Image: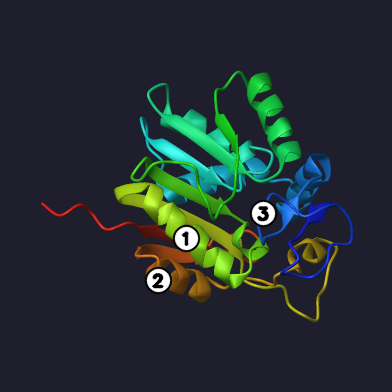
């Protein structure tokens, strides 16, 4: 899978430095989709529905998918929010977004895809009801993760929700083809995610295993507005 990294991380095997981010940016949408399919054991649709249930996505909401990749989850979220809702997808890779837009057109569904950085979201404060971060945080070094969490907190409404999903960590004795794509910045444990979101001002509502591979989720909420 093609990706780029900044000079602050391990030098890239190929590609160029991406858009000023210190995280890893994937650039091979077809291989990305194939890898996701393999990782989900062909149960990607059930996986997406499970995530949207965990995020408690509701009709009429405005939702942000951070690091949306090829847009599959954002498109599914758009179906959940209905005609009165809106879904935005943000990714640093133009190649990923081009495939995402193609998928949305084919499905006849409007999703607003934007090229941008997870650590510098181009949205006003309090704009979204919910945000999704799926298997993305492990692509970011620690400092950038903190910036990303703070940005998501900023763009969420009071009481807004964030669902973060990532790999708990592959068993070092059982390296696989799939684990290769999650090596660059290691794994991010559920405890790490809870601490990260707490530092950004979130309150954890629920956490636990997703039920597929070693994926863990954390559902957190921004503080409600004071009356």
Asked which colour scheme the image uses, the reply is rainbow
Where residue 19 appears, as percent x and y from the top left, is 69, 49
Near mark 3 (Cα within 10 A), the count class, few <14, some 14-19 or many ≥20, is few
| Secondary element at image label 1 | helix
| Secondary element at image label 2 | helix
Indicate left or right for 75 with 70 as reference: left
Q: Residue 199 carries which label?
A: 2
Viewer-proximal residue among 12 and 34: 12
Q: Name the residue under label 1.
A: 149
Where residue 39 appears, as percent x and y from the top left, is 74, 55
- Residues tagged 3 and 2 counted as in contact (Cβ below 8 A): no
Indicate left or right for 206 with 224 as reference: right
Mark 2 and mark 1 lie on one chain; the one further toward the N terminus is 1
Q: Which of marks 3 and 1 is in front?
A: 3
Where residue 159 appears, as percent x and y from the top left, is 28, 51
Report the residue at 37% width, 48% height from top: 156
Q: Mark 3 points at which residue?
A: 20
């Amino acid at each position: 899978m093609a990706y780029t990294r900044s000079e602050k991380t391990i030098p890239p095997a190929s590609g160029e430095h991406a858009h000023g981010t210190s995280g890893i940016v994937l650039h091979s949408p077809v291989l990305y989709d194939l890898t996701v399919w393999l990782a989900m054991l062909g149960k990607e649709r059930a996986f997406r529905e499970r995530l949207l249930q965990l995020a408690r996505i509701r009709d009429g909401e405005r939702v942000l998918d951070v690091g949306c990749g090829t847009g599959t989850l954002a498109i599914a979220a758009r179906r959940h929010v209905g005609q009165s809702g809106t879904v935005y997808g943000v990714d640093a890779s133009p190649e990923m977004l081009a495939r995402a837009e193609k998928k949305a057109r084919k499905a006849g569904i409007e999703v607003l895809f934007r090229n941008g950085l997870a650590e510098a979201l181009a949205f006003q404060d309090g704009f979204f009801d919910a945000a999704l971060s799926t298997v993305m945080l492990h692509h970011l070094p620690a400092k950038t993760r903190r910036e990303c969490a703070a940005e998501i907190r900023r763009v969420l409404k009071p009481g807004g929700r964030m669902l973060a999903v990532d790999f708990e960590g592959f068993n070092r004795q059982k390296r696989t083809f799939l684990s290769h794509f999650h090596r660059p910045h290691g794994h991010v444990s559920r405890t790490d995610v809870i601490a990260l979101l707490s530092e950004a001002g979130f309150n954890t509502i629920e956490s636990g295993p997703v039920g597929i591979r070693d994926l863990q989720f954390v559902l957190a909420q921004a503080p409600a507005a004071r009356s």
